[in-house]
Image: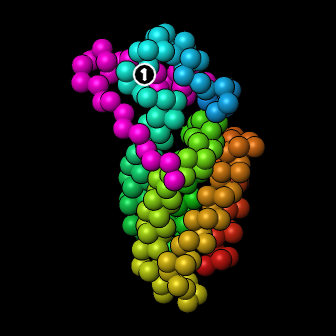
Amino acid sequence: MTPKIKVRQPSQARSKETVEAILEAASQILRRDGLEGAGTAAIAKRAGVSVGTLYQYFPNKEAVFDELIDRVLDQRAADRSQILQGALASDELGPAIVALIDALMALHAADPSLHHQLLRHEAASGQNRLQRYEEGMRALVASRLLAHADKTRPLDAPLAARVLVHAVMGVAERMAREDPALLGRAEVRREIAILVAGYL
């Protein structure tokens, strides 16, 4: 596994603006040209800074991608917790399933091109941040399955949560790559809900 490189954290407002410009430039290039086109020179040019300035904050392009992944996952974790903790508090299993699917679809519908490239980087670098994010999602699902145990067939909650999260995230990630607009369609979410309900 490739160790994560420490990134210099800016303290002054102008430095923070420079870092934000670099990250936004990297995001734009990743969406348009993929990992292969996102070199430090291209990122710096797009950000309107010199390569030397970029290196003041990021030692290489991998560090830029790592910072982007951290931000994406932090935001996803916050969104996931906010949505699921409230929606999955329902005493009814059906609304809990729909809430889970809505939350997952919304997360994967947000900027799918960028997320796909960051997934590629994560896989190549051998980091496990995405795995930790998924573990958090599985723990939330398992807790809801235990709370609704009287409404499902007998389940091994952790195992069932793993199957469900893999299944729903797999569908979401594939659709996000092929046709992101599908993720926002009510009939697609209904079909996934039927899939999950049948499993439970």
Front residue of 89 and 46: 46
Determine which quarter of the picture holds residue 67: top left
Would you place residue 72 above or below residue 146 in this image? above
Front residue of 159 and 132: 132
In x, y percent, where is residue 101?
57, 59
Q: Residue at x 59, y 24 (%)?
A: 39
Determine which quarter of the picture holds residue 54: top left
Considering every residue shown, the one lying at the far right of the view is: 178
Q: Residue at x 63, y 44 (%)?
A: 120
In x, y percent, where is residue 25?
52, 21
In x, y percent, where is residue 79?
42, 48
Front residue of 21 and 111: 21
Q: Is residue 59 toward the left or the right of residue 42 in the image? A: left
Residue 87 in view (yes/no): no
Q: Quadrant of the C terminus?
A: bottom right
Determine which quarter of the picture holds residue 159: bottom right
Residue 51 in view (yes/no): yes
Three-letter amino acid code of the residue under disc 1: Tyr
Number of callouts in the render? Answer: 1
Mark 1, secondary structure of its residue:
helix
- Verify whether residue 18 appears in magenta: yes
Q: Residue at x 29, y 25 (%)?
A: 10
Would you place residue 146 above or below residue 183 in this image? below
Give the residues drawn in magenta, as a range.
Answer: 1-29
Q: Is residue 155 toward the left or the right of residue 185 in the image? A: left
Q: Is residue 68 toward the left or the right of residue 195 in the image? A: left
In x, y percent, where is residue 142?
46, 74
Q: Residue at x 50, y 48 (%)?
A: 2
The residue beneath circle 1 is 55
